[in-house]
Amino acid sequence: MKQTQGRRIIAHLKHRPMTYGEMQRLGISTSPQKRVVESLAEDERIIKSRVGGLVRWRVVRVRA
């Protein structure tokens, strides 16, 4: 089964936090933040942090 763009980006975000620019440079989607939001599973959440003025996204699994 082929993964969606959002799921591919989420796989990267589970390994390490990324800025908007880093998600863009993956070359998976022209609007990666939209793809991530629409592809989250029910037990996944986006954690945003600000480091040096840049917003970093991370996806974590939460317990139900």
Image (tube, rainbow, N blue to C red):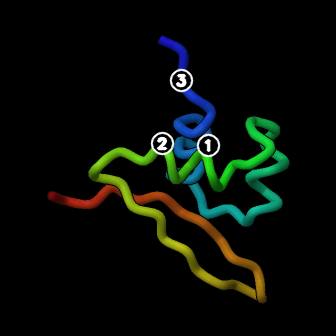
Determine whether, in the image, residue 8 is placed left or right of residue 18. left
Under mark 1, the amino acid is Ile
> Where does residue 30 sit, x and y in percent of width and height?
80, 44
**Residue 39's disc number:** 2
> Where does residue 15 sit, x and y in percent of width and height?
54, 51
* Label 3, label 2: how far apart the Cα atoms are: 10 Å
Look at the picture and state if 19 lies above or below 6: below
Q: In front: mark 3 or mark 2?
A: 2
> Where does residue 40 sit, x and y in percent of width and height?
43, 47
**Residue 27's disc number:** none
Q: Residues within 10 Å of mark 2 (few under 14, many from 20)?
A: some
Look at the picture and state if 43 lies above or below 6: below
The residue that appears at 68% across and 62% down in the rendered structure is 18
The residue that appears at 75% across and 36% down in the rendered structure is 28
Indicate which disc, 2 or 1, sits on the residue closer to the N terminus: 1
Q: Residues within 10 Å of mark 1 (few under 14, many from 20)?
A: many
Please say if the residues under marks 3 and 2 sit with CB atoms less than 8 Å apart: no
The residue that appears at 65% across and 55% down in the rendered structure is 33
Indicate which disc, 3 or 2, sits on the residue closer to the N terminus: 3
* Label 2, label 1: how far apart the Cα atoms are: 9 Å
Under mark 3, the amino acid is Gln
Which image quadrant for residue 5? top right
Look at the picture and state if 56 lies above or below 41: below
Under mark 2, the amino acid is Ser
Residue ID for mark 1: 9
Residue ID for mark 3: 3
Which image quadrant for residue 27? top right
